Image (spheres, helix red, strand yellow):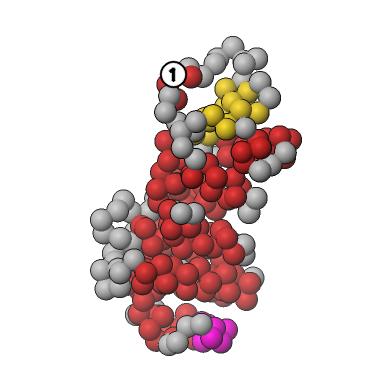
Amino acid sequence: MVGDKATEELAKLGNRSLESIDKVGSWLDGVFGEGFREVGHAFADSMAGFRIRNRLRVIEKTQKAIDLAGLVGHTRPLPGRLTGPIMDAIGDESDETLQDVWAAYLAFSVNPKNPSADKLLIDVIRRLEPQDWPILRKLFRSDPKQLLPDDLGAAANDLEVTMDRLTALGLLQYDDPKSTFLVDGNHFAGTVSVKIGDGRYYETKLLRRLKGETEEAWK
């Protein structure tokens, strides 16, 4: 069970969507494992109210995702060493859509049939901006082909900022024709690419991982 102090903090928030604080404590312990107890003090940080509300929203969404997947009673705890990074990340996230992304990823990761959570994707999701997800959703839903800015519903200049950020996160690879080192287009045959100006962005294996492990948030 989660420690009494953490349970009391949850109760103080009066989260109406959670029927029983005791059930929440048991559920949290089952998902996050013993590592959750070790970082319970995170609920008392300097932005306690803001961060606890964010955590509760993600926790509630994750619980619903697990229920919908028919995994109640059949989940495995997340690795204890990842509890701290995950709790920090979801505490910082106030955007409703990205909270849905976290919930989808966590529900996927506690399914014993799937790969467990890892720091790489945790860091990627944590660094996403709200404006990134509509673009990612369209990339995920596209058949392998070359896309243009209009296909993604964005102006080229605005889109380029987002695409550069996704490239920095390792989700895309950029082919600049002015560069000495060009990407071999044949290497990316059968994948989604986005042409902006003279350059082209190609999806990476990491993008495909994110796509598969957050499917419930975009399908």
Instruction: Tell me: 62 left or right of 78.
Output: right
Q: How crowded is the residue under tag 1: few (<14 C-alpha within 10 Å), some, or many (20+)?
A: few
Q: Is residue 53 visible?
A: yes
Foreground residue, 161 or 145? 145
Q: Is residue 88 visible?
A: no
Q: Is residue 12 magenta?
A: yes
Q: Is residue 42 magenta?
A: no
Residue 131, image x, y percentages: 65, 50
Foreground residue, 147 or 66? 147
Instruction: Tell me: 204 left or right of 198.
Output: left
Foreground residue, 85 or 188? 188
For the record, the magenta segment spans 9-16
Q: Where on the picture, by quarter, is residue 109?
A: bottom left
Q: In the rendered image, which quarter contains the N terminus?
A: bottom left
Instruction: Tell me: 162 left or right of 104.
Output: right
Count of numbered badges drawn on the protein: 1
At numbered mark 1, what does the secondary structure look like: helix, strand or loop?
helix
Residue 34, image x, y percentages: 34, 69
Tell me which residue sits at (54%, 86%) in the image.
16
Q: Name the residue tied to disc 1.
A: 186
Residue 133, image x, y percentages: 58, 50
- Residue 178, compared with residue 77, is above or below; it is above
Tell me which residue sits at (42%, 36%) in the image.
205
Which residue is situated farthest in the top direction here?
A: 180
- Residue 115, compared with residue 83, is above or below; it is above
Residue 9, image x, y percentages: 53, 82
Instruction: Tell me: 154 left or right of 19.
Output: right
Tell me which residue sits at (30%, 53%) in the image.
114
Tell me which residue sits at (25%, 68%) in the image.
74
Q: Amino acid at mark 1?
A: Asn
